[in-house]
Amino acid sequence: MDSILAGFVRALRAAGAEASTAETIDAARALALVGYADRAGLKAALGLVLAKSEDEKQIHDEVFDLYFGRPQPVAMEQAAAQLRTGDAEVDALLDLAQPGADGQGGDPLAAALARAAASAGVDEIRFATQTGYYARQMLEALGIAPLEARLAAQRADPEAQAEVQALEMARDQLRRQARAVVQQRYAVFGKPATEAFMTEVVVTRALGRMAPAEMERMKAAVARMARKLAARHARRQRVELRGQLDLRRTMRANAGHDGVPVTLAFKHRRRDKPRIVAVCDVSGSVASHVRFLLLFLYALHDAVGDLRSFAFSNRLQDVAEPLEKLPFDDAMALILKEVGNGSTDYGQAWVDLHDRHWDAIDRRTTVIVLGDGRSNGSDPRIDLFAELAGRAKRVVWLCPEAEGRWGTGDSAMLQYRPYCTSMRHCATANDLERTLDEALEAYH
């Protein structure tokens, strides 16, 4: 495959577009028809085969302009006169550094910089702090060493100051041009990689220790994780809906065709649609974890058709309506204000769930409980929790406290544990993703 197209597809993927192998093959076919000369036509053709949504179309257009565009123009200083040193390598660099060799004519400088960038591996840049290193590698690939050696030698000669000035000017101009190329490649390859690295740091950080400045990055990361999770389970569902070939029914159905299998019959196993009930402790020690669990769940609306959400500190309330009707941050602020100010009482929460919302739980329901199981010494109502576990398909408990603290003080975690399908420490966004992936997997 064309290395330029391969680099463009890699840049698209780094920026967040899901360009598949099949789409890349289609892009290569489109390139063979359109070519590189017509940039507008190439942009339109690649956008058709590589972008599958409005968001990906926007990413494609931005990356195309960066990848195929020229670096920001760098002002070229006018030399006093065309210098000739007699050294072919040095004179070639001096010619490149002259105004007019910046890509506006025959593109000698642009072509030389492109070759140097490929030789230096500039596309591997990942952090802005590497700009200086890669710019230097490009200069070395351009063959800057003879020019620098002559410059060092001529500085000692008082009569060669005009040549020294011209050599310094050429070196500085080549350095600025190389740096401009590196900065452009950083925008294409490095910046998305830096963002991906920072996101990876955030999603593995304890939710309770999230700095305010990281919240927006975290919300974007959770939304992206939820979309991928929903797409993965949608693909699984499509595969399973195909079923397995039922040979006996196929033969019966085609008896009138002398056994030629014109009509195929498949075996299908009935599968429940995902149904989730989330019961969340929104007291102060757990609130940050609840925020991201609910954000995950409501971003999974395509994969979870039936979702009920309840929150409590002592009295339990149905909070599905504000989450569905209000912007997420506004809904969470309202929930924390109305529900999160009481003294935590798990027993009373189970009583409220039993008395008012027990019909929300049946054999198809996965109940996800998020809380630390600390009831301030009140009755944890293990009997009602056991009855809940008997009604549900699965009960998954996520606890923000480490397992070593379960059962200490007023914690009832070890009393609840026997009735849970799964009980685990939940500290990061990755923990939430894994739990929800397993919950959805139980319906396949």
Image (cartoon, rainbow, N blue to C red):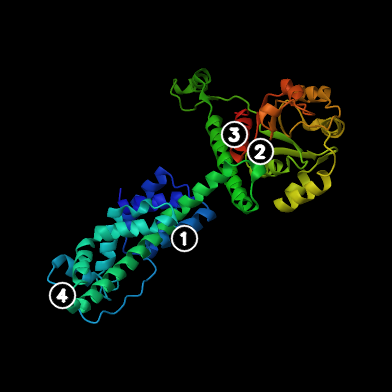
Q: How far apart are marks 3 and 1 (CA)?
A: 33 Å
Residue at the spot of label 3: 434
**Relative to 253, is 373 above or below?**
below
- State the mark number for residue 62: 1
Label 3 packing within 10 angstroms: few (<14), some (14-19), many (20+): few
Residue at the spot of label 4: 84
Q: Between 436 and 379, which is closer to the camera in this rendering?
A: 379
Dot 1 or dot 4: first in sequence order is: 1
Label 2 packing within 10 angstroms: few (<14), some (14-19), many (20+): some
Q: Between tags 2 and 3, which lies in front?
A: 3
Q: How far apart are marks 2 and 3 (CA)?
A: 16 Å
- State the mark number for residue 304: 2
Q: Is residue 108 left or right of residue 384?
A: left
Indicate the secondary structure of the residue bearing disc 2. loop
Dot 2 or dot 3: first in sequence order is: 2
Q: Between 247 and 109, which is closer to the camera in this rendering?
A: 109
Label 4 packing within 10 angstroms: few (<14), some (14-19), many (20+): few
Q: How far apart are marks 2 and 1 (CA)?
A: 33 Å
Is residue 42 visible from the viewing direction of this image?
no
Q: Between tags 3 and 4, which lies in front?
A: 4
Label 1 packing within 10 angstroms: few (<14), some (14-19), many (20+): some
